[in-house]
Amino acid sequence: MYQLLKSHKTFEGNTIFCEHDSESTKTKMKFSAFLPREESQIDSAIIWLSGLTCTDENFITKAGAQRYLKGTNTMIICPDTSPRGLNLPGEDDSYDFGSGAGFYLNAKKAPFDNNYKMEDYIITDLVNILKDDFKVNKISICGHSMGGHGALILGLKNSELFESISAFSPIVNPINCPWGQKAFAGYLGEDKSEWSHFDACELLKSGFKSKNSILIDQGTSDEFLEEQLLTNNFKNIATEVEQDFQLNFREGYDHSYYFISSFIEDHIKHHLNYL
Amino acid sequence: MYQLLKSHKTFEGNTIFCEHDSESTKTKMKFSAFLPREESQIDSAIIWLSGLTCTDENFITKAGAQRYLKGTNTMIICPDTSPRGLNLPGEDDSYDFGSGAGFYLNAKKAPFDNNYKMEDYIITDLVNILKDDFKVNKISICGHSMGGHGALILGLKNSELFESISAFSPIVNPINCPWGQKAFAGYLGEDKSEWSHFDACELLKSGFKSKNSILIDQGTSDEFLEEQLLTNNFKNIATEVEQDFQLNFREGYDHSYYFISSFIEDHIKHHLNYL
């Protein structure tokens, strides 16, 4: 059960902001959503996972996704990127770890292991809200940057649950980039055998697959492409293991929501094919 | 001449953020813009004026307007809503006066009369940038709330300069609402004969007209409709003086950017008719 905080009529539907108690994080968690029709007419959902520093608000205010869902029976739901307000040591020291940087994994290292259970939060709490409260029967998953990583790992590990996966500018191989290495060391500890459970490239190597084609858009002027995102590692491994995918390098686009807004229509259509 | 601060490729064009020295405000001023094509191909512009508390960023990040300008020769430019950083007494005390609340008029009262020259700023500085730097030969004007007021008064007073006018949720009759009365008393003083030069309803009564139909969209669930916006006063006076207009009351929509994003396509199309 969730509590409705705000609602704004948008493209004949409603953009809503909500809060609920999460069993996984043991905190209140917020999400935003867009329901293109009356709640009783909604039958499927796209989960959007945001990137570093984002809250439940960035995507729903900036991406312009509502327009492309107008008139469909598919909602989009956008959770926050970490638990909030815990005041754990080190939680608020940097933009790429702790608050706003949950990395969609279950932390195993103190002091984060009690609350930073973002994998469980998405797969159980948020999915249960979709199924029980919104009566959704099909779900797809997508995201941006850290959230693109989240969409890939959660989508691959739960291929029965998610119909389709897509990502903008995803961190495809976190065990081999500074953002991922910092987060995984902090949340999981130094035992790197644990890390591969949360790395899209490693999951593909281990045999995890999505039943449908994975759509990825990546800007060529993205400042993080070379050091953090490592998109070609995904391309090489997905080709090797025969995971169907479509990877579009977009000339001149960067890492921002201006890029996302330019191609979100393609991603919505991709998911609507399977929902 | 302006200085380019940031540029983000968007819908095959560029969303840009700029700064320039304003002769009218005697400060640096910021604006954002979207150029759907190469600068050399741009031949017309829409000026967007934002509402209370906004900067040059709100519209360009939230309204989703870029999509509807894609492939055209028309740019949109979004100036800030007041001078900034002056540290004048009383400038930062409230959301509806001073910083972020310039009301698109020329202040006559100290300490604001030196810098709060937003009418001059739009009509001379910004228009000169459009004509001299961007080589634009036709301009239309629109805005939201306080910016809807700005679009109406500047559009009516400069009917040769602006091809068309539109507004979302405009303050149509500021001399008769609390926002307007507070701002006009603070910027213009207590002599109410001065106030009518900055009130759309009063300008219509005095014979000012737009050469083309004025488009207005207004949400029926707008919390400010009854007390501040007074939309029907515009309807009555425009009908009386035979100013062509189209006023759409939109059932259930509020005062937010979710409303604007839902109908900005209609406003862009309205202006493209005349540009």
Image: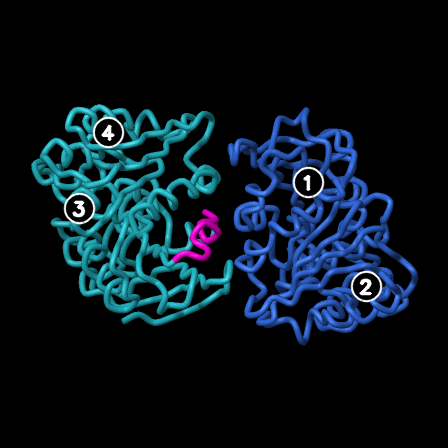
Chain colours: A blue, B cyan
Chain on which label 4 sits: B
Q: Quadrant of residue B260?
A: top left
**Label 2 residue SS:** loop
Q: Residue at x 31, y 27 (%)?
A: B227
| Mark-to-mark CA distance, 3 and 4 | 18 Å
**Which one is in front in this view, the residue at disc 3 or the one at disc 2?**
3
Question: Is residue A63 shown above or below A16?
Answer: below
| Secondary structure type for disc 4 | helix
Q: Nearer the viewer, residue A44 or B176?
A: A44
Residue ID at (65%, 67%): A249
Where residue B106 appears, as percent x and y from the top left, is: 16, 50
How many marks overall? 4
Q: How far apart are the two marked residues, 3 and 2, measured between alpha carbons?
A: 60 Å
Pointer 2 residue: A199
Figure check: A31 above or below B219? below
Q: Quadrant of the C terminus of chain A?
A: top right
| N-term-proximal mark, 3 vs 4 | 3
The residue stretch that appears in magenta = B62-72
Q: Amino acid at mark 2?
A: Asp
Is label 1 or label 2 in front?
Answer: 2
**Secondary structure state at the residue bearing disc 1:** strand
Q: Can residue A268 be seen here?
A: yes
Is residue A191 something one can see in this rendering?
no
- Does residue A113 appear to the left or right of B76 in the view shown? right
Say few, some or many: other residues with alpha carbon within 10 Å of mark 4 (under 14 / 14 to 19 / 20 or more).
many
Residue B234's disc number: 4
